[in-house]
Structures are given as structure tokens and as C-alpha cells.
Amino acid sequence: MSRIGKKPIPVPAGVEVNIAGNVVTVKGPKGTLTVNAHRNMKVALENGEIIVTRPNDDKENRALHGLTRSLIANMVEGVTNGFKKELEINGVGYRAAAQGGKKITLNVGYSHPVDLEAPAGVTVETPAPNKIVITGADKQAVGEFAAQVRKVRPPEPYHGKGIKYSDEVIRRKEGKAGKGGK
């Protein structure tokens, strides 16, 4: 039994929800998001709450129930508050520079700077040369772009150099334990 799927999703003031068949569109101050719910799931708007129901207790329907509810809840959260991922750059001479909120240039130890273009609906800022803040209404797009930025130079365990999430903990390794002499 999906405990997540049974929870109703409250619709805050200033958020408009439109349900046409299985297409759910959520419009709010931060933008508009749309999801195409699975054909087995029934989505309804009742008393200012979005309710997701399933036809039976098949394994697939139980899994889709919680998934559909989470996707719609993330859309409502995204158009009201938005999502944010923060990354840190560690390393001598490593830095980032955002250009116009859509493009980021990374200098992270390669012979050339790495340029990345943010997808639509995602903005990038660099409050400091070693900090990157990625924001947007779509949780998946924000997380995906943050993963792409991190993938350019993942943190390494010996010196801790690289790009990491601000809340990520890097387990450090000791390195070689030399013999001491000949």
C-alpha cells in the first residue's frame, strides 16, 4: 500500500492546476510545468487539493501511484518555491564564471576552459569563484544540470580536488605509505 500516494497534495494560493485527461499542468509564480501521468492513474482536483488514485493493487499500479503523486508534488513545490543545488569547487586555480545566467565556464585543471549551457528554465550563478548555485522550477532539470557540472571534474579522494555538492562529504584516502629509506 502506497502511503505516499494516498497523501493529498495541497495547492497553495497563486498556483493554478489544470487537469485534462492524464495531462497535469501546474502554473505558478516561478513558471509552468506539465507532466503526462500514466494512463492507469486518476488525478483529480478536490477542495483545493490534488488527489491521485489507482484502479487496483497490482504491483505496477502501486509503484506508479507513489511516483505520480511525487512528480505532481514536486511540480507544485517547484512553481511556488523552486529548487536549488549548490556546488563547491576545491583546488588551486579552480574557478567558475557564469555568463548571463544561462552559461557557465569552468577552469578546473584542464588545458582549456569547459563551457556548459544550462537547459531552459534553469539559471546558473556564481556568488564566488568557487561556488556555483543552480536554480529552477523543474527538480529533474536542476538535478540533471548539477550532475553534468559535477561530472566535469568529480572530487578525488586523495586531495579532495574537484567539484562537489555543498552538502556532499568526500571520504579521504591516506595515499601511499612509503618505506622510509633504502
Image: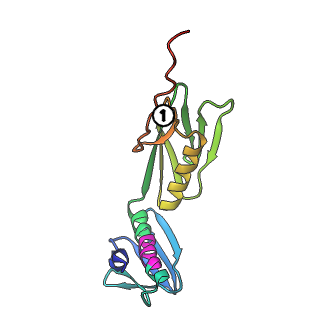
Q: Which quadrant would residue 62 be assigned to in this image? A: bottom left
Up the image or down, 62 lies above or below 144; here it is below
- Which residue reaches farthest right? 111
Which amino acid type is marked by label 1? Asn
Up the image or down, 96 lies above or below 151; here it is above
Up the image or down, 144 lies above or below 165; here it is below
Seen at 52% across and 47% down, the residue is: 124
Q: Looking at the magenta stretch, what is its main secondary structure?
A: helix
Q: Secondary structure at mark 1?
A: loop
Q: Badge 1 local density, few (<14 within 10 Å), some, or many (20+)? A: some
Q: Is residue 36 visible?
A: yes
Please state the horizontal and vertical placement of residue 67, each as a whole percent of the image: 45, 73
Seen at 56% across and 9% down, the residue is: 182
Please state the horizontal and vertical placement of residue 135, each as a whole percent of the image: 47, 52
- Which one is nearer the viewer's eye here, 154 or 24? 154
- Which one is nearer the viewer's eye here, 44 or 15? 44
Q: Is residue 129 visible?
A: no
Please state the horizontal and vertical placement of residue 177, each as a whole percent of the image: 49, 22
Q: Is residue 7 left or right of residue 133?
A: left
Q: Is residue 33 left or right of residue 50?
A: right
Q: Is residue 14 highlighted in magenta?
A: no
- Which residue reaches farthest front? 182
Please state the horizontal and vertical placement of residue 1, each as a whole percent of the image: 36, 80
Here the colouring is rainbow
The residue indicated by pointer 1 is 130
The magenta segment is 63-72
Up the image or down, 2 lies above or below 84; here it is below
